Amino acid sequence: EGFISYLLQDDISPLDFHYAQPLIVLKNSEKKIISYEQTDFTHDMKERTRLINRVLMNNWADLDLPHSQFTALKNQGIHLEEILYSRRTVYRVFNNSTFDEGGRFYGPWWQSIPSELRARITINGKETVELDYSSIHPRILYARQGIDCPEHPYDIGLVVSRSWWKFA
């Protein structure tokens, strides 16, 4: 009853709602969510994720698009208005029943928009830039081993395409 009367207020807005998701999600090898023991480690992870979410909520990520483009996207089944207000925080997902695998952040709207719209993201009204680091993963591995990275790190002398190595 209290919720219904809240909804009937004149000053309600999409900002009054947000998508509730656990801060830490542990999945088994079948990708089903499983419970886990609360430890100092999981508590610290949750606190760091809360801190990230506070920063996200204290800044405004938006899309610099004219209304006509929002309408055109809506006609294509992409409902940006709904997610811009409600999906502004992150949660972490770990896989294979362990905190050793996964740990990626999920949840915010900018992860699910079409890639061609990412150049239109603004933060607090300022333009953003999406950086693309060429061959970042092999370069990190070379650096960790203290070895100079070759000009073409995917070229290791085998006759296979770069895309095979990148996605294998």
Image (spheres, grey):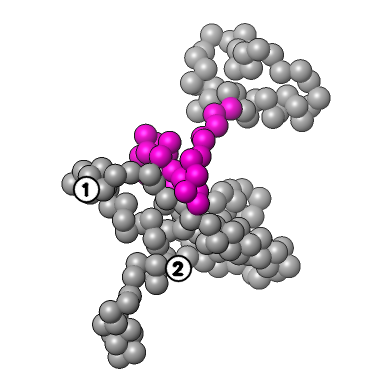
Does residue 29 appear left or right of residue 14 in this picture? right
Mark 2 or mark 1, which has the lower sequence index?
2
Residue 15, compared with residue 8, is above or below; it is above
Question: Magenta stretch: residue 112 in it?
Answer: yes
Q: Secondary structure at mark 2?
A: loop
Task: Say which quarter of the image contains residue 151.
Answer: top right
Across and down, in percent, residue 96 comes to 56, 52
Q: CA distance from mark 2 to mark 1?
A: 27 Å
| Magenta highlight range | 110-133
Furthest residue in direction front, as rendered? 125
Q: Secondary structure at mark 1?
A: helix
Across and down, in percent, residue 2 comes to 34, 89
Does residue 117 appear left or right of residue 163 in this picture? left
Residue displayed at 78% across by 20% down: 147
Furthest residue in direction right, as rendered? 146
User: Residue type at mark 2?
Assistant: Ala
Across and down, in percent, residue 72 comes to 21, 43
Residue denoted by label 2: 20
Foreground: 111 or 96?
111
Residue displayed at 69% across by 29% down: 140
Foreground: 86 or 49?
86
Quadrant for the N terminus in the image:
bottom left
Task: Say which quarter of the image contains residue 55.
Answer: bottom right
> Is residue 66 among the parts visible in the rendering?
yes
